[in-house]
Image (cartoon, rainbow, N blue to C red):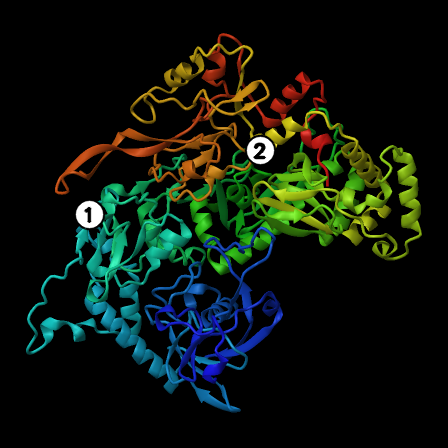
Amino acid sequence: MPETDFVPGLYIRDDDEGLFSRDIDGQLVRLDKPTEADYKKNVTLQIDGVPVTVPLAEPLTDANGNIVVDLAGRTTPRYTTIFDAAQKLALETMGGEKKISIPILCHQPHMRPVAVCRVCIVQIYGQKRGRRAAERKLLPACQHQVKEGMEVFTMNDPGADGERVRQTVKVVTELLAADHLKPASPPELEEEFAEFNELGQMTRRCGADPSRFRMELLSNPPPPPRPQTGRRGLDASSPVFQVDHSACILCDRCVRACDDVRENHVIGRTGKGITAGIGFDLNVPMGESTCVKCGECMVSCPTSAITFKPIARIKIVAKRRSAQTLSPRELTSDPIFAGIPPKFLLWQRGLVIRRQIRAGEVLCRQGEPGNTAFIIRSGRFKVTIFPRLPAAGGRLFHRQRPTIRERTAADVIVGEMACLSGSPRAADITALESGEVWEIRRNVLDRLMRLPSQRHRFETKYRQSSLDLTLQNTDLFRGLEEENYRQVVDYLRPRLNFVRVQPGQTLFRQGENADYLYFVRLGEARISVHLHGKVAKTVSSGPGTVLGEIGLLAGFLEDKRGSIEEIDRALQSQLNRSGDDPAQAFPPGVRTATCSALNQLELAQLARSDFLEMLRKFEVLRRRIIEQSLARLRSSAVGHRILDEYVAQGLYEGQSILVLDLDNCTRCDACTKACVDHHGTATHGIPIPRLLRAGRRLDNYMVATSCRSCTDPHCMTGCPVDSIHRGKHLQIVIEDHCIGCGLCAENCPYGSIFMIPNERNRIAVPDPEHLERTHIVGQMKAANCDLCDAAGELSSPHPACVAACPHDAAFRMTGPELLGRVRRGHGGPVMPLRDDDAIA
């Protein structure tokens, strides 16, 4: 390209080389970025002579495999890499990611590629000037994009190209192992870690001999180098982990684990040349840094550079005496768990337990907290889903028969929906015959969801189960005769699509054409009506409700004073005359409100044409939708300030909010004293309160700072040791093996979790004033309100804070109950908000 054709931003500096940069005519340029249109373009290439077809680009995903979207719902395309194609080929032909023909050290499927270890190199052939030509260099598969007609040869290829790759990978492995293949420290962990050291496994796989490059074997070795400034050896300053910098291969997996996966931003690169290494904060010892001890860096490390100390091993005690804890070796030999980091299983014992089940034994019951999932190893199980009871003041529910299904080992897993979402169990599961199940905790299930094969399997099953539960629990279908309900379900099930919406993302905007009806399964939606450029009304809508029906019927609801019968007759007449495609006969409706997600939404989506056909086929649903839409449109404008504040404070998701009536409260603090007296020193070795008599107000009620037992528990997301669960009364319970990382407190948007030193578990930490000394402190542990029944011994909770109030000023209630009290004081309707005020 002539110098006069310079385009700003096209050329970049050598030290700013990015992903997929290439040398063209001696100049370094960045190739075109992928677009969403590339998702539909398929590319066929060969890997070791076997063809595989993949899309040219894929949507960017986060560390948990969820597609990353912006607030407008747009995805971020990324080019599909050779490693992605090889992974797909391994899944299709060999049954698992672990059998992939391309080795990796620095890469992981849930991390962004950096291509620094170079053990994933492959030989590539392509077309140049109409001829088959080989790339002059071996290129990293984790970062190189796929192209149509590309031929790739890995170290498994028996030919000359495979031999070249094998020898190159062998030399790279020998160079790494010569300097960095070290036994784990401390010595008592050496035997356990040796089997799972990925660098050691790679050495054995390649037949590498690291001793060829060791200095002591030279006949005339050079003098030993002088100690390098800034290069550290063993760092044992952390009370939980130990860092051996001499075993670090600078793969950056710990950096990406800390920065991208956990977003703690503690670990980074430091130094240059021989002094290059990882550093904590401003290159201080790990124990003096802001490390939260979540362990993500340790379980991501492929060598013995970061290990845990034996005293910090987490042992989770099984609640059932008959349960047997499975060993890391047994788990990693199973195909389901083959992709889980062995260090994770070594550090936390008891994450997976084996249970022998007798015929007739109940595995779990509907409505119980779903803190674990079950992998079926043998036996047959009956899944019974009972219809949900009507809400207070709702329609009487017709006596529907429960839904019964059978599950076997072919179904692999049951109970995963409640475990992943933090919601109560949706069904009873009973053994039809004797069998064996493996009970797994949520952090193991989260790890499994990072593996493409397991995620696809669980995601498909989760989506189908979610659609079935959505129909089961939608208020619109309550009270239907059994036969009518079955007909509705049979019609809707093949026509519904499962949709996830991220917090803050807009589902639709006021004034847009209405294309879909949405059934809410999980989460809360914010619905805002704009008048004259300002938000005139804000309400929320949660599980069991529908969104968007008003916009789909906008042409028939213009006269809010019309009767249900008149609108029904007009709509039925139009539907009967519309022919085979009602959507063509009806003018498109317009959204009357803007809808966005307050937290993560799970929805079932029904297209406009299918919605209109449903109204034509089922008269009872047509009348209900008209009745519901008119009630929402006619809802009073009184108390909108209260509704706005109700939504802004997140009270809609509270299931047990501590509310203080300021008309009666004398600020005697009896509630706080009762909380401290009841819990005593049982959890932290010192008396601590689980509430603060302070918070925001809703009218004349103060919402105290105490756990609300949210329907969507933000605090339970991502706990590295799975120590936070729901209790018997759906309250949040923190177990004794909490490591004090503070993630739950950070995730709680209401400040209801407190990080307090646990004097029952004292640890040695470096003295900041005298680095050679240590002092003993209590390890941090989370504390929150557990409704005074963490063990679940009571049939119903009896919080001490409420019982101790001498002035009848303290209450525990749900968000809708609090709103009902406030609206009663304003003379407004007392019924729950979502029954009469949601607008779409």
Image coords of residue 111 (percent x, y): 42, 59
Q: Nearer the viewer, residue 426 or 825?
A: 825
Residue 302 location in percent, x, y? 31, 60
Whichever of callouts 1 and 2 sits on the residue coming sooner in the sequence is 1
Kindly indicate the quadrant of the structure image that contains residue 195.
Answer: bottom left
Amino acid of disc 2? Ala
Q: Is residue 750 left or right of residue 196?
A: right
**Residue reaching furthest front?**
4
Q: From what the image shows, is residue 393 above or below residue 764? A: above
Label 2: how many Cα within 10 Å (few below 14, some 14–19, many 20+): some
Seen as rendered, the residue at the extreme top is 806
Q: Nearer the viewer, mark 1 or mark 2?
A: 2
Q: Which residue is found at the position 76% from the left and 34% from the top?
A: 632
Residue type at mark 1: give it: Ala
Q: Position of residue 823 (x, y in %)?
A: 67, 21
Count of marks placed on residues: 2
Foreground of the two, 461 or 308: 308
Label for residue 648?
Answer: 2
- Gap in Å between the C-alphas at discs 1 and 2? 46 Å
SS category of the residue bearing label 1: loop
Image quadrant holding the C terminus, namely top right
Residue under circle 1? 236
Numbered disc 2: secondary structure: helix
